[in-house]
Image (spheres, helix red, strand yellow):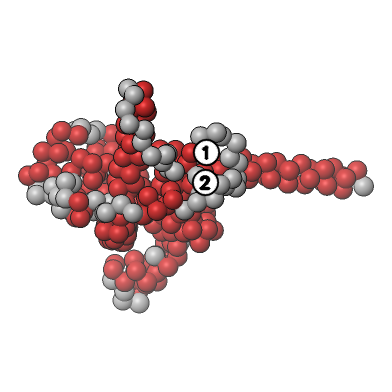
Amino acid sequence: MIRHKSERVFNALNILFMLFLSVITLYPYLNQLAVSLNDGQDTIFGGITVYPRVFTWTNYETVFGNAGFVSSVVVSVLRVLAGTILGLLLITGAAYAISKKELPGRNFFIFFLIIPTFISGGLIPMYILYKYLHLMNHFLVYILPMAFVFYYMIIIRTYLQSLPPSLEESALIDGANEIQILFRIMLPLSLPVMATVTLWLAVAHWNDWTSSLYFVTKKNLFTLQYVMYKVVKEAELVNEMTVVNAMTGGTAAPRATVTPESVKAATIIVATLPIVLLYPFLQKYFIKGVMIGAVKE
């Protein structure tokens, strides 16, 4: 009876702790959503929690009204699709090859692939390299540099090594080649780790904006994240000009309904919403894939 009571107390405390953790995790996102839907000038007074006080779509109209918004969405979506697919093919192929202990020169390949993980030439050599490879102002500048990630390869390799060797031996006896074994046996059994790496690659491609900043000047190749960055900077510039104009006794500018903070909140929601919507479908694979791929030998 005492044990049963202690279990109920533990369960109650556990539920309260998880509810508290959920609240402190969700509140910042819900707060930014409320700010993005609230009048910018009203937001200045503070007090916005999880619902807008003066509802408006103006902040999103400012974000969506950017001239390059539509093209940037297309570029970002194409980048995520192409970059994730190519990355999975290269990383999985390398992981499958490295998982073979009988591979000639296996240790050399691992050492060769791990060098760029710890040693980087820096931004200037990278810029010069991309220029000589004719990647500047080219869509492939988003794809090729991120096509292979050594850490992801190790995660997949470790997972593949955890699968029973008898599966591969049986397939070889039945006449299957290495490609057939990889795509018909190994990959279907590796859905948790593949979903995990897919999510990592997609998020990395979706969130990257520095590639556009450093290596792209053509507006039709700007990614969504970089356009969002420009929208926020433009809103900050307009706000600074208004303040300076007011302090110097210039003509009073029209009262703006958007502020840098409100526009920034709208860009956060626009930039993160696709990932937030995608994550629940991959969550059941995510934890299992990370744990097995990183720990099990």
The alpha-carbon separation of the residues under discs 1 and 2 comes to 7 Å
Q: Residue drawn 42% across and 39% down?
A: 255
214 or 262, which is in the foreground?
262
From the top left corner, tell me how far across and down residue 88 is, in percent. 32, 58
Asked if labels 2 and 1 touch by Cβ distance under 8 angstroms, the answer is: yes
Q: Residue drawn 42% across and 68% down?
A: 188
Read off the residue under disc 2.
Answer: 38
Where 289 falls versus 50 (above or below)? below
> In the rendered image, is residue 114 in sight?
no
77 or 53, which is in the foreground?
53
Sequence order check: which comes first, mark 1 or mark 2? 2
Where 114 falls versus 246 (above or below)? below
From the top left corner, tell me how far across and down residue 103 is, in percent. 26, 54
Q: Residue drawn 29% across and 46% down?
A: 226
From the top left corner, tell me how far across and down residue 38 is, in percent. 52, 46
**Amino acid found under the numbered disc labelled 2:** Asn
**Amino acid found under the numbered disc labelled 1:** Thr
Label 2 secondary element? loop
For this orientation, the residue located farthest to the bottom is 174
Q: Quadrant of residue 176?
A: bottom left
Q: Residue drawn 40% across and 69% down?
A: 185
Label 1 secondary element? helix
Read off the residue under disc 1.
Answer: 43
